[in-house]
Amino acid sequence: MQIENIIINEYLENNSFITTKQAESMGISRHILSLMAKEEKIKRVKQGIYTKNDKELDIYYLLSLNTNKVIFSYETALFLNNYISKEPKNIHITVPQGYNVNRIKKKADNITFHYVNINNFEDSKINIITKQNNEVKVYSLERTCLEIYNRDKNTKIIKKIFMTLNEEKKKNLKEFLLKNKINLNN
């Protein structure tokens, strides 16, 4: 089991998690992963997912694992895109209408779900890298600002972000907002 331990730990140096499927593709059985977790050489996060004992969990990646029906939105998208520095108290996730979120609800108790028409669900979706070096899906700045405005009817946070953008991004955001009948001068 020593060779497997080296392989797994080497993999986890560059990745936050390893799944049983990934381990099996490297020739390491589920049984070995279970033994390593029992001996506290790695930590079992949930069924089929393991990490190093000393790694901080990436809740965003964990929430998006095993589903392509999760896109981070609203303030969470702003945080993950580095437009705001303070991590929001609630994690905002958008899913298609009719999607069963019960499995996701079990992973964290501070999730706010937003539902959109399946036809618009993937519009303006982008992939970003979290602080723990994992890829997750979020909505673009433009869509996020539109969602926040439609929810709050307030441009305060949008104006604040607007002031931090470079000229090209300012121009793109302003054009997008005006196209959607949102004027930042109000």
Image: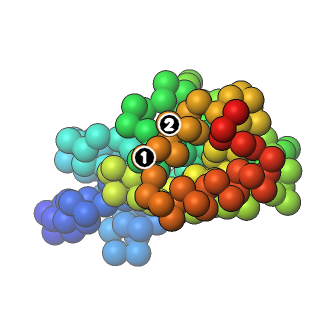
Q: Residues within 10 Å of mark 2 (few under 14, many from 20)?
A: few
Q: Is residue 117 above or below residue 156?
A: below
Q: Which residue lies at the image location 85% right of the left edge and 50% below the top edge?
A: 117
- Does any portion of residue 84 appear in the rendered image? yes
- Residue that mark 2 sits on: 160
Q: Is residue 152 above or below residue 60?
A: above
Question: Tag count in the figure?
Answer: 2
Q: Which quadrant is home to the C terminus?
A: top right
Q: Residue 44's spot in the image, x, y percent?
A: 36, 43
Q: Which residue lies at the image location 59% right of the left edge and 46% below the top edge?
A: 72
- Does any portion of residue 63 appear in the rendered image? no
Left or right of 38 on screen, residue 144: right
Residue kind at label 2, given as amino acid type: Lys
**Camera-side residue of 21 and 139:** 139
**Camera-side residue of 116 and 68:** 116
What numbered label is drawn on residue 155? none
**Quarter of the figure with residue 33:** bottom left
- For the residues labelled 1 and 2, the Cα–Cα distance comes to 7 Å
Residue kind at label 1, given as amino acid type: Thr
- Residue that mark 1 sits on: 164
Q: Contact, CB < 8 Å: mark 1 with mark 2?
A: yes
